[in-house]
Amino acid sequence: MSALAIWVLWVVIGVVCVIIEVFTPSFFIMWFGIGAFAGALVSLFSGSFLFQFLAFIVVSTLLVVFTRPLAKKITGRPARKAAVDGLIGTDGLVIEDVDPETGKGLVRVGSDIWRARSADGISKISVGRRVRVVSVEGTHLIVEEHRREPFHAEKGGE
């Protein structure tokens, strides 16, 4: 491939990345477009594809690492949380005793059933009790008893 063709290829990759960024404003793809423009610039001075590719990788990586946090701050977008983090603060129903001695316990939150542990690590929470999710650790919900009275569906529970 001729040097001009490689230069054009880098420019096309850069333009495509910038166009994609326009339609998905994530401040992520654009950095690879700028990296491709760096590869195009290096191709004007060096015929070595290795140097061009290194310029692309180095510039793209540096831009992602150093400017993406700044772009997030400017746009004011909060960091994405995992879907399970949305469970924190929700109420659930104990359907199998949450027992720190056995390490077992099941809680229903909405229509889903989760393994659960007590937040303090020593309290046993009995079946029928209402709990609140305080955190998530792996596949376990960490819960604390929410109310002292047993859970009753007719009281508007879940």
Image (cartoon, rainbow, N blue to C red):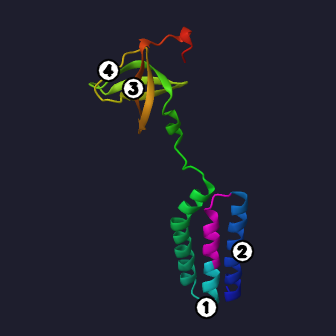
- Spatial CA distance of label 3 from label 4 is 10 Å
Q: Which of label 3 and label 2 is nearer to you?
A: 3
Identify the residue shown where x is 68% and y is 73%.
Answer: 14
The image quarter in which residue 148 lies = top left
Where is mark 2, residue-wise?
12
- Spatial CA distance of label 2 from label 4 is 63 Å
- Spatial CA distance of label 3 from label 2 is 56 Å
Looking at the image, tell me whether mark 1 or mark 4 is earlier in sequence order. Answer: 1
The location of residue 81, given as percent across then percent down, is 52, 45
Looking at the image, tell me whether mark 3 or mark 4 is earlier in sequence order. Answer: 4
Find the magenta span and give its range.
25-37
Is residue 86 visible in the rendered structure shown here?
yes
**Secondary structure type for disc 4:** loop
Name of the residue lying farthest toward the bottom:
45
Where is mark 4, residue-wise?
124
4 and 128: which one is in front? 128
Q: What residue type is labelled 3?
A: Glu
